[in-house]
Image (tube, helix red, strand yellow):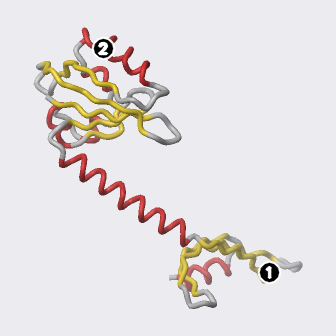
Amino acid sequence: STLQARASGWERLEATTLERRLRRADGDDRRHISHTVTMPGPDGTLDRRLSICTDIHDQKLAEQRLAASETEYRTLAAALPDMVIVTNERGLVEFANSVALDFFAMSADEIRNARAIEHLHPDDRERIRAARGETIGNSRPAKLECRFRNGHGEYRWHMIESVLLPGERPRRLAVARD
């Protein structure tokens, strides 16, 4: 509890961090994080505290909205009948929907950080690399046909639409239809 953490920090020279709700003068409850350090006085006894309290209410609300948005988009990706794969700038898989996991016969943990290009037919790899390079820096989707190797080792033709995702780091969203 908050009181136990305070008491613990008061008895020893240690810092405590607590997240809590504080009521403002206008009656509004806001989330705050407080960092407190107990400091020794001139005689060495722990007799002073320094606390910094930061309002994190808006940050918490933004985190909740982000989590809800992520859940919504994951639900949409799961509902599609096509493979949905997100790769990072190095071509490593960051996300694959259940259709892709079933096709490649891999778990989410197995496919995460796998190289997507390694599942392409060897004759298609260079063409896909070239097309990927051409679309970097523009927002136009790339439309390509290629062969993916499924979990049984068979190659199947797919129509892929691929776009760069907005954000600080380059990621690519690919939707592949068998």
Could you say which disc has been placed on residue 118 in the image?
none
The reply, left or right, for residue 66 in relation to residue 28 is: left
Q: Is residue 157 above or below residue 74?
A: above
Q: Is residue 133 above or below residue 175?
A: above
Callout 2, which amino acid?
A: Arg
Q: Is residue 148 above or below residue 64?
A: above
Residue at the image position 21 percent from the left and 48 percent from the top? 78
Residue at the image position 32 percent from the left and 30 percent from the top? 162
* Residue identifier under label 1: 45
Residue at the image position 26 percent from the left and 41 percent from the top? 108
* Residue identifier under label 2: 125
**Other residues around mark 2 within 10 Å, as few (<14) / some (14–19) / many (≥20):** some
Residue at the image position 11 percent from the left and 19 percent from the top? 154
Where's residue 41, x and y in %? Answer: 84, 79
Asked if the residue under mark 1 is in contact with the one under mark 2, i.e. CB atoms within 8 Å, the reply is no
Q: Is residue 77 above or below residue 174?
A: below
Looking at this view, name the residue that lies furthest to the top. 123
Query: Viewer-proximal residue, 152 or 135?
Result: 135
Callout 2 secondary element = helix
Quadrant of residue 129 in the image? top left
Callout 1 secondary element = loop
Please identify the quadrant where the C terminus is shown.
Answer: top left
Mark earlier in primary sequence (2, 1):
1
Callout 1, which amino acid?
A: Thr
Looking at this view, name the residue that lies furthest to the front. 140
CA separation in Å, label 2 and label 1: 69 Å
Where's residue 6, x and y in %? Answer: 61, 81
Where's residue 168, x and y in %? Answer: 53, 41
Quadrant of residue 163 in the image? top left
Where's residue 80, x and y in %? Answer: 18, 44
- Nearer the observer: mark 2 or 1; the answer is 2
